[in-house]
Structure formats: structure tokens, C-alpha cells
Image (cartoon, coloured by chain):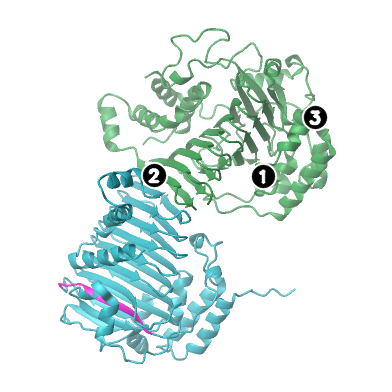
Amino acid sequence: MNVTTLRTKAESQIREQFDAASASLPGTGWVSALRARAMDTFAAEGLPSRRVEEWKYTDLRDRLREVPAPAAASPGSVTVADIDAALGPVGAIDAERIVLVDGVYRADLSKVTAEATVIELMSLAAMLTKAPAWLEGKFASDGGPVVSLNTAFMSDGVMLKVRKGQDPGRPVLLVHARTSAEPSAIAVRNVISVEVGGKLTLVEAHVALDGAARGALANVVTDVTLADGAACDHIKCLVDTTSSTHLATWNTKLGKDASYSGFQLTASPALARNDINIMFAGEGSKLDLSGVFLARGSEHIDTTLVVDHAVPHCESRELFKGVLADRAHGIFQGKIIVRPDAQKTDGKQMSQALMLSPDAQFSSKPELEIYADDVVCGHGATCTEIDADLLFYCRSRGIPSDVARAMLTESFIGEAVEKIENEDVREAIGTLAIGWLRDE
Amino acid sequence: MAAVQETIEQVKSIDVDKYKYGFETEIESEKAPRGLSEDIVRFISEKKGEPAWMLEWRLDAYRRWRALKEPTWAKLHYPKIDFEDLYYYSAPKGTTGPKSLDEVDPQLLETYAKLGIPLKEQEILAGVRKAGEPSPSDAPSEGADGYASMKGKVAIDAVFDSVSVVTTFKKELAKAGVIFCSISEALREHPELVKKYLGTVVPQSDNFYAALNSAVFSDGSFVYVPEGVRCPMELSTYFRINEKDTGQFERTLIIADKGSYVSYLEGCTAPMRDENQLHAAVVELIALDDAEIKYSTVQNWYPGDKDGKGGIFNFVTKRGDCRGKNSKISWTQVETGSAITWKYPSCILRGDNSRGEFYSIAISNGYQQVDSGTKMIHLGRNTTSRIISKGIAAGKSQNTYRGLVSAHRKATGARNFTNCDSLLIGDKCGAHTVPYLEARNSSAQFEHEATTSKISDNMLFYCTQRGLSPEEAIALVVNGFVRDVLQHLPMEFMAETQKLIGISLEGSVG
């Protein structure tokens, strides 16, 4: 009997799209070979289903029924004003600006004033076309199905480097804008590195411009490498109104005495999966990750993180807060690994969900995997609805019920938002989150 | 301080007898041929003189087992078990239905005496107090306050290899209407009860090991507490593996009818051998309206030697069903033995206002691997559950807590509190926590916290500075660490547990 691998419609579409697009994707030689290998790696397992432990709560095979075609080159009619309008409060942040439209770097819309001695910026597409040999090592081969797909299809992205001991002084805003009127798929890869002693505040904003189609698919991978003593604040915000599917991966590697603060605001995509993988490669480093996920309707937001303490003397903190309304499903999976000999590790993790409607769902899987003894690690997870006592207290003070609920919800997510160090960014993110809450 | 002092003394004395239950009893036994087939299932069923429906039930389970795959998701590594190379039935010869203790092979009685398990009815569990005596003021005091008034009598069902040897205090229990006997006897005397409840909590094809057990289980205990009865004494089963190359498969079924209460204790030991032995038990608890079942286990199967050779592979399915409203099931376990432990005593909270509890101390040393935890499945309204798990890993062992707390969409007002702490002693061991929380309605209120740490240098320094040796200091800290769980153990087990904690951690200092 012949055994044939059953493919879902989406999986067949992906293969067909790859065969059709591979010739026009940037890069030849080892880049083409890399893409083909990644495609084969993906095809071997296909889309992850709930039988795959890491995807237990987000069955992509079931949820991704149709895959839109890769985005065509953008027509070029986008203006800075369009981008500003879509960015809202984030656009007002005083920042260096880099813009990608439909997955393609647009120098005309970007504005970077920092000296080339401080920041080095290149388009990934240009680099893939040149294909220097050293670049190949930047693409990990075992990042899971979503990263494999990204490697196969990546059209562009930025390669950003903060040079040794330098600090651009103001945040770098990386805008991922979508304009396509047809549902389309984009695959973007960003390669960020901060050299020894450098500092960077990076804000990634995902926006859809007026007229952008509903039901798009974005697959964005951002690799961050921090050299010894480097510091990076990395903020991502997505406030979606176009029922898109958002697959985002952060792979961050910390050198010695490095510090990394990450924050993610994810509001209202139809489906979002945020993968965060942190690797401590040098001693004495610090990690502070936080996030807010907001969902209503039948939206589904999954945050899955793995913090790998491979070396001793590192500290990690995670705080994630979710607000879930209607039939929304929020997921948090957080794994802290402490490798043998990673002594003196200090890890703490907390995930909390506030459920505003009876049918909201929250699934959490905080996980500790510890192989060293001289460590302090802990995690907590809670979920509940708004505390009736708190609500009663507010109402007894004359605050109407809906205002009281809003106040309590805002203060709930405030704890995570406050972790953002940069004041402008913090305010902009806070405004976006509160805007979503008041949108009910 | 008495209890702590006792543990410290135990820790001191453990060099000599690390696993003191490792002896073997030479007793003639009757075995089924090696391997597993439908014929073996028929053989076992025939040996037991079971009704036809039971044989069909077993054969059904056997066929389902053939179709199932061994689970591999647990954080356990062990050589593949050859299920065709085991004896699935072993019984001490000449024990087919002894009328009284006098007919029991004296070798057997001696075995249980060595284990500290008195089977003669006039005796009371060693180390506690004599029957009929009022609770003396010098009774073990630390942490035992809540149990001081408990009756001193314990009825015991002793299971040797695959067969129940003797059940004590039967008459007295019968007076209260409580049925406490081996499950084979229950199949003969009360088939209607067994038929009604067997497999309703753990169905035949629930998982690989439960299916295997359903096909070949040879004995176990059966308890039925009738409506409104508070069982007059603690019930206890003592399991002993003796025969070489045998698998032990017991099946325990406990039914607490409306408004009844029963407390059940389970203990187990096995001889020291270089080969691994398989133990796959199934325990089903059913609590009807307003009933309460308290199930306590001290699992002390042979854990293997210091190089990880030998030991019991313990794959156990334990599940309680709070079927009636206001029912309560509480699991308390002390896991110190077994080379491999795969065990998740769970509660299905079906009845409104029902409550599930899980208290666990899991200690691993040497090359032991423990993957244990619980599931609290909230289905009814206003159900509550509480999980307290304390894992202690020493030596080169791996100790995993794996648990699930879930609330169904209609389980409004579900509440859960989970606390799992792990303590690491030594830098070659691992402690892992894998909890799943699934809330499908907003009124569910779940709280989960877990910590992992080692015994802090400050604590040890403080203790040694006060004149305690490092061993004493560790015993003191560990006893404090597990105190939350110890308090939920019946008194008989507390003493034993504190000794076990000492024994299990032997060699972990330094």
C-alpha cells in the first residue's frame, strides 16, 4: 500500500506559492538553497496542529484554512501622511523611522538622521541579493515551522546594527505597513544587532492603512543579538482592525552583562501567535519581558515564550496581562529552562487574565525546567473576572458601573505598560491600549 | 520538636538500612506462563472464578490495549518494557480463600510482620498505641493534633504479588454495613455493585496502562460504604511485590454512597532486585451526594540502587469522581520509592459544590525519575479544588510536577488554588513544573504559583551555627518544607513518612 502524506488545502497552497514565487524572491545561490531547505523542513511536518505540544492551544492546521498569495510589490502611492494617520499616537514619538510597506523596505518613506557611525542600516533584500557568505549563518535552521516558512518566503526586512558603544539617542521606529487591497501574505525578517556597549530602543509597529484588505497574513521574524554590555528596549505594538493573522517571532540572544527589555501589545487580530525565544549566552545579563493582549469577538491571541538560562548569574522577569471579552481565547505559555550549571539564576514569571464576558477563555501553561540547584525560580498564573468587591467599592463612591469596570481594567493592564522605560513610547502604547478598552 | 527529632535520628541511622523493605520472601507460588495473550486473560479470569461478563470486559480491554501506544509525553527515560516477557499472574500457593488467619501461610504473616503491618486483628499498627487505650497524652504530638481523637483500629487488606491474602476486621465492618474485601471476592459476592461502578471513572481504554490493568488485574481492594455511614475505622491496603519478573496489577474500587465517609490508606514495598519490575495499578473512587473519600498513599516501592540499577516502574492511574453534589475527594500521597513514577491522581468535579484536594510530597534521589501531579476537572457549578505539591529532588534524580486545572463552560464559580514548590538538593538533579490551566468561563477563578529553589545557605548557616550538623539542618528544613502536606496525612502515615523522608534523602548532603 502506498503511503501518501495528507496535506491540507493551506499546505498545498503554500507549496504552490513557493514554487511560483521562489524565482522572484531576492537572492540566488546559497539563498535559494536556504529557502528550498526551509520549505522542505516546513513541508516535512506541515502546519503545526494541536498534537504538537507547543501548539496545543493554537491549532494552525485547523485555523489556517486558506493562505493568501504573497503580497505584490506596492504601487508606491503611499505617503508619509498615510503612515502617520495609521500610526496614531505611535507616529508622534520622536524617533528615527524605518518603513516597510507590504513587506518591502521603502527608503522614500523612512527617515534616519543618526550618523552612519552610530547606526548601520541595510535592507535585507539588498543583502540577500548580494548574498555575502557571512550572512548565511544568521539564519537558524531549527526555529520551528513558522520560522521555516519565513525563511522560505522572506521578501525583505531591515538589518540594523548599533555600533560599538553607540546610542542613537532616540528610539528607532520600525513600521510594518500593509496597504494591499487584496488579502495577501507577507514574510519579513529583521536582523538587529547591538554591538558591545551599544544601546537601542526599537519600536515595531504593525499597522494597516486605509483600504487595506481584511484577512491578511503576516509572518514577521525579528532576530536580536546583544553583544557584551549591550542594552536594548524592544517594543512591539499591533492594534488590528482587519481580522488579520499575525505570526511573530522574536529570537533574542544576550551576551555578557547585557540587558533586554521587551514589551508586546497585541490587540484584536483574528489570530495572533507571538513566539518569544530568549537565550542567555553570557553571564550577568538581565531580561525583563512584559506584554498586554486584548481580544474580543472570537479573536485568539497566543503568547508563547521560552527563556533559556544556559549560563549562570542571569536574571529574568516576565509579566503578561490579558483582557478577554466575548468569546475570545487568550493563551500564555511560558517556559523557563535552567541548564545544568546555570547556578545563581533568578527567574520569575507571571501571567494574568481578566475575563470580561462569561464565554471568554484563558489557557495558561507556565513551565519550569530546572537542572541546577542554586537557583530561585517561580511562576504564577491567575485568571478571573472583575472583582465584585472592587466594583462595589467604586460604585459606592458614586462611580457608574461601566466607568468603574473601565478603571479597574485599565489599572490591571497598567502594571505591564508601566514597564516601558521610554516615556514617549509608554504614553503612546498606553493610549493605544486604553483606546481599545474604551472601544467596547 | 519530637517529630523533627525523629527524622533527624532516622537520617543519622540510614547508612545501615537504606531500603529496609528490600528482603525477599521464599514462598512457593503459582504463576501463569510468561507473556500476554487472550489466553492469559482467560486464565486469570478463570482462576478468579469470574462471571462471564467480567471475562468479556477484560477481553475488550485487552483488545483495546493492543491498539494503544505507550505514552511518551512524560519527562521519563527508561528502557523499553517488553510486555511479552512478564508474568501477568502470580499467587502464593495455598491461599485460595483462607477462612481465618490461622490458615494463612506463616511465611506470609512473617513477611507482613517484618514490614510492620500487623494482620492479627488484636494488634494495632505498630508504634501508635494499643487498642482500647484512650489517647495517651504522650502520643506523637507534632502536627498530629487533628488526629488525636482518631480511632486506633485499622482494617487491612494485604495483597501479596497479585492476590489478596487476608482482610482484617471484616466482621466489625460488616456490622456497620461497610463492605471491605478483595475485588475478586467482591466479584463473587457483590457482582451487581462491581458491574455498576467498575470502569466508570477510568474506562478500559483510558490510557495504555489502564487498559493493560483492565485486562489482567488480578486483585485489589473493594470498598462500599452505604448511605449515611461513617466508616468506623481507617481502611488500609498493603501491597507487596515479591515474585521475580512479575507485573503487579491491582485494581481498587471505592464507592462512598450518599452522605458517607471513608478514609483509606495504601502502602507498598518490594524486594531489592537488579531487574526493573512493572507495577500498573488503577484506582477508582466514586463519591455520591454529600459523601467524602480521603485516600492516602505512601508509595515506597524499591527505587533501585545508588547506580540506578533495578527498581519498580510505577505506572498508575488514579482518579476520583465527585459524582454527587457536595461530595469531596482528597488525595494525599507521599512518593518516595520506584525507579519510575508516572502517576496523576485526579478529581472529576461533576457534582455541584463538590471539592477536590491533592496533597503530594514527591521525593526522588539516586537515579529516580518522578513525573507526577494531578488533574482537577471542574464540570459542576461552584466546585473548588486545591493542589499542594512539594517536590524534593536530590542525587541525580528528575522530579516533575505535571498538572491540569480546567473549568468547563458551564462550571460557573469554579475555584482553584495551586501551589507547587520544588526543592533541589545537589547540582545534578532536576525539578520541573508543567502546569496547565484552562478556564473556559469567566467566573472561574484560578490561582497558580510555583517556586523552585535550593535550601538557602542562610538557613543552613543559621541551623549549623545553632549547633546542628548539616544533615540535621537539611532534615529540619525539609520537614518544614513538606509540613503543609504532612498535616493532611493520617497519623499512622505521618510517623512512617517522616522516617521515609530521612531514608530517601540519604547521601544527598555534601
| x and y percentages locating residue A107 in the rendered image | 26, 87
Q: Could you tell me the amino acid type at mark 3?
A: Arg
Mark carried by residue B449 = 2
| x and y percentages locating residue A361 in the rendered image | 47, 56
Q: Is residue A333 above or below residue B52?
A: below
Residue under label 3? B188
Report whether mark 1 lies on the same chain as mark 2: yes
Question: Could you tell me which residue is drawn at 39 percent across and 20 percent down?
Answer: B5
Question: Could you tell me which residue is drawn at 77 percent across and 48 percent down?
Answer: B60
| x and y percentages locating residue B311 in the rendered image | 58, 39
Q: Which residues are magenta?
A: A169-179
Q: Which chain is green?
A: B
Q: Could you tell me the amino acid type at mark 1?
A: Ala
Q: Could you tell me the amino acid type at mark 2?
A: Glu
Total tally of numbered discs in the picture = 3
Q: Which chain is cyan?
A: A
**Secondary structure found at label 2:** strand
Label 1 crowd bin: few (<14), some (14–19), many (20+), radius 10 Å: many
**Secondary structure found at label 1:** helix
Q: Is residue A144 above or below residue B401?
A: below
Q: Could you tell me how far apart the alpha carbons at marks 3 and 1 are, in whole angstroms?
A: 23 Å
* The quarter of the displayed image where residue B55 is located: top right
Residue under label 1? B210
Question: Could you tell me which residue is drawn at 26 percent across and 58 percent down?
Answer: A285
Badge 2 sits on which subunit? B
Badge 2 vs badge 3, beta-carbon distance below 8 Å: no
Q: Is residue B81 above or below residue A247?
A: above
